[in-house]
Image: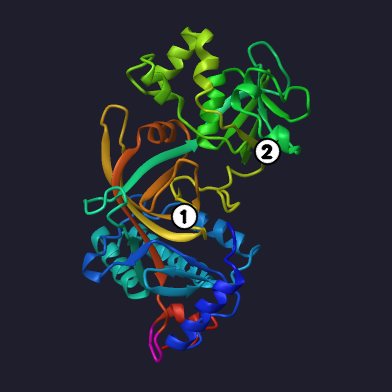
Amino acid sequence: MQPRKAGAVGWVAFFLVLLCGPTKSWGQRLHQTPTERVPIEEMPGFQDDLDFAEMSLAIERQIQRYKRRSLRGQIQLGQDVYPLRRIKDSLVIFRQLASQGQSCLSSGRVDRAECYRRFRFELKQRFAVYRPKLNAEDPRYGEDEQTFFTGYYTPLIEVKLAPEGEFQYPIYALPRKEELARLSRVEIDFDGALRGRGYELFYAADLFELYLLHVQGGGRVVVRDGERSQYHYITYAGTNRQAWRFISLYMREQGYIEDMSIEAQADFLRKHPELQREIYAYCPSYVFFKVTPTPPLGSDMVPLTDNRSIATDSRLYSFKGLLSYIQAQRPKTQHIPFKRFSRFMIDQDTGGAIRGKARVDIYFGEGDYARLAAYNTQHRGDLYFLMLKRPRCGSQGMSFRAINTNEECF
């Protein structure tokens, strides 16, 4: 993210002071978002299909990140401008409401419908809700379910610490030298331009499996030694800054495959090794990794949480950690295609293919279902962002007023 020029910020601040009074400090960045406020009569139902499971973990991970970074500055949602610390406050208060909701649901003394009615009442009282604001030039403008959803996950692949048998394809760390970090996929994987330079982390057995690891931007590897197995998380460390293009598109254009499934791609590549260089050259982009003790990190260096993290376009949603809510579709099983679901999430990541105001990648986590969901989620739905309202002067019974936001009420 590039900071605004100080002069531009100064003039914006000057006119805001003239029009609205002192709303921001000189030199603080204003993070703008392409959103609009949702009228209360158009708000969604706010029901979580996982009954808030793991939401507290996702919030805690984000809060720990905020302890290590500055929250000076502001963010604009719709026409409303908030201090960045309000994002953290929103997570804190939402965690309290979610905990109360979980307690109600597990008590057995109140039915589910009543638990969610109470939860929704509190949520709408305390939070403002926003959605992407599309213009005529934007995809899906004027249509129902304007947000396009895909999925990603953390793949598990077997690796070796050194070349051995079929394990000949290195997983590389980010090279320190600029000229090495800009090499293309073909130069790295087929010409061996990085081999022997000390950047090898592990060795994979299948080049397509390695390509899929690049698609996901992170993963988990297992090193097997007899009966012992060592697991390591690897996360995105950078790219060679070359164009990313999915090889499935090239394979279909060339008539190599009709079905663009992972299985069809893998089968063709396995049967035609003589065409692999040509096919992989279509995607010159290359992803480098680093080993981490936690699940893969999002773009804001926060460990992603299964079923609770999403990725959006960082050019449009530059400040990460916004409390979010999605209504989308996901695979139910391999034989029962899809079901609708709604879930609270946190915007903690971005991706090279995630472009647009209403474009979301859902992180499904680890395991067989996560893989199924990641490769089969391509549906439309709705995206919302939630922000804690500014407390009113003299309001009573509002527990969120206990948070020290250092703001005046109105």
| Residue placed under numbered mark 2 in the picture | 291
Query: Is 395 part of what is drawn in magenta?
Result: yes
Label located before the other in sequence (1 or 2) = 2
Name the residue located 25 percent from the left edge and 70 percent from the top edge.
40
Instruction: Answer left or right for 396 relative to 11.
Output: left
Name the residue located 46 percent from the left edge and 25 percent from the top edge.
247
Query: Is 351 part of what is drawn in magenta?
Result: no
Residue at the bottom extreme?
394
Tell me the CA gap for discs 1 and 2: 23 Å
Name the residue located 68 percent from the left edge and 18 percent from the top edge.
226
Give, as a three-letter code, the residue at label 1: Asp
- Local packing at callout 1 (Cα closer than 10 Å; few below 14, some 14-19, many 20+) is many
Name the residue located 40 percent from the left edge and 32 percent from the top edge.
375
Q: Quick one: 21 or 156, which is closer to the camera?
A: 21
Q: Quadrant of the C terminus?
A: bottom left
Tag on residue 347?
Answer: 1
